[in-house]
Image (cartoon, coloured by chain):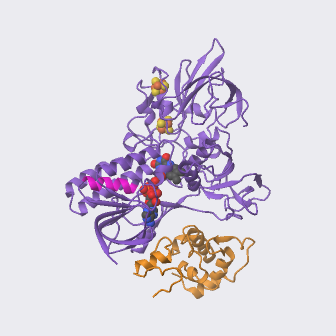
Chain colours: A purple, B orange
Amino acid sequence: MKIERKEFIVVGAGPAGLSAAIEAARSGVSVTVFDENARPGGQLFKQIHKFFGSKEHMAKIRGFRIGEELLREAEEKGVEVVLNATVIGLYREKEIQVQIGTEVHHYKADAILIATGASENMVNFRGWTLPGVIGAGAAQTMMNLYHVKPGNRILMLGSGNVGLVVSYQLMQAGCEVVALVDAAPRIGGYGVHASKVARCGVPFYLSHTIKEAEGTDCVRGVTIAQIDAKYQFIPGTEKHFDVDTICVAVGLSPMTQLLKMDGVEMADTRGGYIPACDETGATSIPGIFAAGDVAGIEEASSAMIEGRMSGEAVAAYLGYASADEKALREKELEESLGALRQGMFAPKNRGKKLEKTDEGIELSEMLLEKGYIGDDEIKRFPGYRAEIKVHPVLECTQNIPCNPCQTACRKDCISIGDNITSLPISVKDSTCIDCGMCVASCSGQAIFLVSENPEKGTGEVTIPYEFLPLPEVGEKGYGLSRSGQRICDATVRRVRTSKAYDGTALVTIEVPIGYTDRARFYRKADEAQ
Amino acid sequence: MFDIQEKLKEIGPYVPESDDDLLVCRCEEVTKGEIRRAVHEGITTIEEMRRFLRCGMGLCQGQTCGMLTRRLVARELRVPQSEMDVATSRAPMRPVAMETGGRDLGVEKPAAGGDAE
Ligand SMILES: Cc1cc2nc3c(=O)[nH]c(=O)nc-3n(C[C@H](O)[C@H](O)[C@H](O)COP(=O)(O)OP(=O)(O)OC[C@H]3O[C@@H](n4cnc5c(N)ncnc54)[C@H](O)[C@@H]3O)c2cc1C
Ligand code: SF4
Ligand code: SF4
């Protein structure tokens, strides 16, 4: 057995690991990254949706592009990325075992960062081991990496952002999502993500869970039922759905095995069973760091900043950066991280029942329970404004860390202000030139351009559209409500695509006047609802 | 930690539940009932449970069932989940083929039909 020496080893080439590698390499540290996958990027390579945050957090860019960018930067900085390399052991002397092919390699490093991410949680209802019950992350890998449809008729369990985002992507892949089910009484993820699923007609069943997956050789159906406050099924509330796939998105658990085996101090927290570490990810063992989901489940945007903080701290630990340099950079990154950790969904608000937005506006209960905001409710939010000439309506009613809409509009029609979690405002008396940039850059697909033509008795609504095939100009169909119900006839007047829209098409439908405030999606006449 | 004898008295004997046949650990096919019964036999830590029933000792090394087992044992013992220890992690964290492990120790794979030295 031979031990090779390395300066800084990173385990995991996800957003956290790659960011740390880039940051440390920038200071002159020589870095080796191991990842067990054949492709680097971690979770990012499955994320085909546009991200939240602000520009510095790479908001409105699709996840996989962020991954490509990180990889390019890592290569540029001379980081060695070793793929198909599974780290199977870690010892407190900073010794590490890596399985590559059929060989185990041994390394000793001066500093090690664990950025192994998280694995999906499971629930064990009757029938949960049948083929066809899969994790939502697995469904996402099948669709977005391998271009395989996970199933045809799908029930999603879990209404957090993962459940919502994957439900939408399943529909994009051509699957039918028959229901979105969650045991909690309120939707866990962002309202904007829920709304884009709801307007496609997917019903939400909150305070419900799966009673049984049916079938003998594979999933043939599923029965859900309502539960009471003590999580007991309420008899008589059972509902059956014919499905061939059940997707489970009930949370993630940090993959901390490597940290546990080297004897790092651990803590049982709301974010999971995680290493006790400071803000730079330094654990109880000097020279061993942790960043990203493994140090507490959050987001790719925060994982990237955490990674950079760890990279900086490692550079200082190894003597490549002075304490002053480290402190300065750390402060900058902390502010950026702080901005992401604000708002309704901030770690500090987990599990709390909020009634009002930061602006003091009553939150929509309906949005939290059914996934869409009431036709009248929307009017109390600053993103709504009534006007005849074309203007943006921003159906973004929760304080989330996001502001690409403000940056997108060069005509100052949209304002959020300095605090990125403030609600977007559709600015009064501003002049919208109908460029569509706001609609395309909204990560939550929550912006609509609305105008009315009283003489003709019609109005137009422009909606973000990310399904193929695209509707054709002149085509007739229906306007769907926020809950996905057919409410009026609609004619497609314009379909805009552009490189600047980055894959989001803008479909403008003409609807009878009076429906411009209610029609939020379009479906072709002969398509099944 | 609690006194096992006192705890066993407190929780009383094992009472069957209708879904005791539900699988918890799918790799090693361990059911909810088996785990619950083991608690009443005095198996109160995840570590012991793994050796006793092999739950969490299969291919996924407890990645899937670890949390489920922890919750179940805590419920049966009537203690908060946070008071339950979690399973110890040991290398290798992912399954490693015997061939690979052997080679790491300097043992080469015997030629087909031949004997290992
Ligand atoms: C469906 C879904 C949607 C999401 N949407 C968003 C979003 O819109 N915005 C956002 O900011 N975040 C989003 N996230 C969250 C985001 O993807 C994660 O928070 C982020 O990827 C965590 O980064 P990480 O680097 O910590 O871990 P990961 O991205 O999970 O990377 C960990 C890497 O470590 C490797 N690894 C693990 N163990 C080993 C080992 N033993 N040896 C070698 N390699 C190993 C893995 O192969 C993997 O590549 C989403 C997540 C999901 C599942
Ligand atoms: S369409 Fe263009 S001008 Fe109008 S609000 Fe959106 S970004 Fe601004
Ligand atoms: S409206 Fe603005 S703040 Fe809200 S999701 Fe869209 S881009 Fe983000």
Give above or below for A421 relative to B80: above
Q: Does residue A25 appear to the left or right of A450 in the view shown?
A: left
Q: Where in the figure is residue A497, as x and y percent of width and height?
A: 52, 28
Q: Does residue A505 appear to the left or right of A319 in the view shown?
A: right
**Residue A481 visible at all:** yes
Using the image as rendered, state which of residue A87 and residue A179 is in the foreground.
A87
Is A19 covered by the magenta stretch? yes
Q: Residue furthest right?
A: A236
**Residue A227 visible at all:** no
Q: Where in the figure is residue A361, as x and y percent of width and height?
A: 53, 38
How many numbered dots are placed on residues in this image? Answer: 0
Q: Where in the figure is residue A187, as x and y percent of width and height?
A: 60, 49
Using the image as rendered, state which of residue A392 and residue B103 is in the foreground.
B103
Which region is colored magenta? A16-26
Using the image as rendered, state which of residue B19 and residue A349 is in the foreground.
B19
User: Of helix, strand and loop, which mostly describes the magenta segment?
Assistant: helix
The residue under the point 70% across, 35% down is: A485
The residue under the point 65% across, 80% down is: B11
Give above or below for A126 relative to B106: above
Is A13 covered by the magenta stretch? no
Q: Does residue A398 appear to the left or right of A158 in the view shown?
A: left
Using the image as rendered, state which of residue B14 and residue A285 is in the foreground.
A285
Q: Where in the figure is residue A401, as x and y percent of width and height?
A: 45, 43
Quarter of the image with the N terminus of chain A is bottom left
Quarter of the image with the C terminus of chain A is top right
Q: Residue furthest top?
A: A455
